[in-house]
């Protein structure tokens, strides 16, 4: 009885789209991914959480030992 309208579908292709631009964009993205992967491997060892916790415990123990020498 009451038919609802369907959404229109458009097959739009840009007039000035070059396939070269898409190739260069894909090439840039692949190079960017390679650079990001390389930077992850060179992460600093001292900035990881387990190392920071161990260093904190070492500092606390060192403070406790040095406090014994002051008395």
Image (cartoon, rainbow, N blue to C red):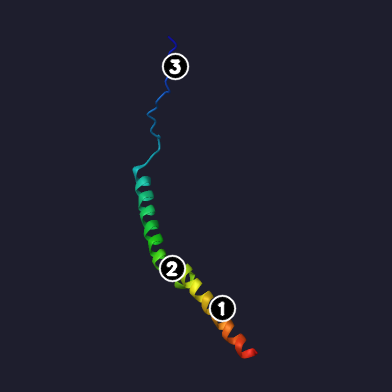
Residue at mark 2? 43
Q: Residues within 10 Å of mark 3 (few under 14, many from 20)?
A: few
**Image location of residue 61, percent across then percent down:** 54, 81
The residue lying toward the viewer, choosing from 3 and 29, is: 3
| Element assignment for label 1 | helix
Please give the name of the residue rendered at 56% of the width and 78% of the height, measured from the top-left corner.
60
Quadrant of the drawing holding the C terminus: bottom right
The residue lying toward the viewer, choosing from 70 and 59, is: 70
The residue lying toward the viewer, choosing from 60 and 12, is: 60
Marks 2 and 1, the one that precedes in the sequence: 2
Tell me the CA gap for discs 2 and 1: 26 Å
Residue at mark 3? 4
- Asked if marks 3 and 1 touch (Cβ < 8 Å), the reply is no
Direction from residue 21 to residue 69 in the image, left or right: right
Please give the name of the residue rendered at 36% of the width and 42% of the height, measured from the top-left corner.
18
Q: Quadrant of residue 6?
A: top left
Tell me the CA gap for discs 2 and 3: 57 Å
Q: Quadrant of residue 22?
A: top left
């Amino acid at each position: 009885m009451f038919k609802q309208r369907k959404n229109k579908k458009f097959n739009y292709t840009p007039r000035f789209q070059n396939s070269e631009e898409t190739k260069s964009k894909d090439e840039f993205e692949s190079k960017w991914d390679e650079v990001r992967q390389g930077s992850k491997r060179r992460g600093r060892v001292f900035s990881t959480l387990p190392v920071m916790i161990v260093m904190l415990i070492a500092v606390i123990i060192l403070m406790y030992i040095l406090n014994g020498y002051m008395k």
